[in-house]
Image (cartoon, grey):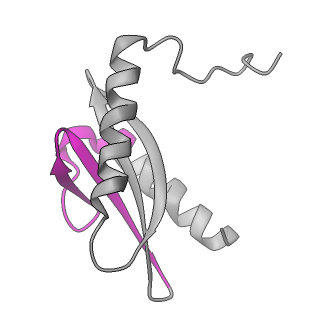
Amino acid sequence: MPEKVQDKCLVKIQRLEEQGYELRRPEADSLRDGIHELRVAFRRMQYRMLYFFHGQQAIISHGLKKESVVPSKEIDLAVERKARFENDPVKHTYGENDDE
């Protein structure tokens, strides 16, 4: 992923952190089954980060390049990851010391 796209993604993630549930179109949108998309556009390419909420915290499932619509299989993957996270949040949460 180009560095400028990464920078734009970080800005959107910061906006999500600040706004939470209040973040709306054109920056974010609700898909289905508690899954939302964070939207980033760069040079005619549409990038999406799929996320869900756990309490007041937004959890990013994964990202993808989007053409016309977010494919159902990508939403299904996010729904599956949401269920796994909800069953054991500690196991599925990154920590600074996890690599040690």
Q: Residue at x 26, y 49 (%)?
A: 36
For the question of whether residue 58 can be seen, the reply is no
Q: Residue at x 37, y 79 (%)?
A: 67
Name the residue at the front extreme. 73
Front residue of 95/64: it is: 64
For the question of whether residue 87 can be seen, the reply is yes
Name the residue at the right extreme. 100
Point out the stretch of residues depicted in magenta.
17-42
Q: Residue at x 61, y 62 (%)?
A: 6
Q: Is residue 66 left or right of residue 56?
A: right
Q: Residue at x 70, y 22 (%)?
A: 96
Front residue of 55/31: it is: 31
Residue 56: image quadrant is top left
> In the image, is residue 16 part of the stretch drawn in magenta?
no
Residue 100: image quadrant is top right
Q: Residue 38: horizontal and vertical position, in percent?
A: 35, 56
Q: Residue 85: horizontal and vertical position, in percent?
A: 40, 22
> In the image, is residue 34 part of the stretch drawn in magenta?
yes
Q: Is residue 92 left or right of residue 84?
A: right
Name the residue at the bottom extreme. 44
- Is residue 39 placed above or below 66 in the rendered structure? above
Front residue of 66/18: it is: 66
The N terminus sits in image quarter: bottom right
- Is residue 40 placed above or below 81 in the rendered structure? below
Front residue of 2/83: it is: 83
Q: Residue 42: horizontal and vertical position, in percent?
A: 49, 80
Q: How many marks?
A: 0
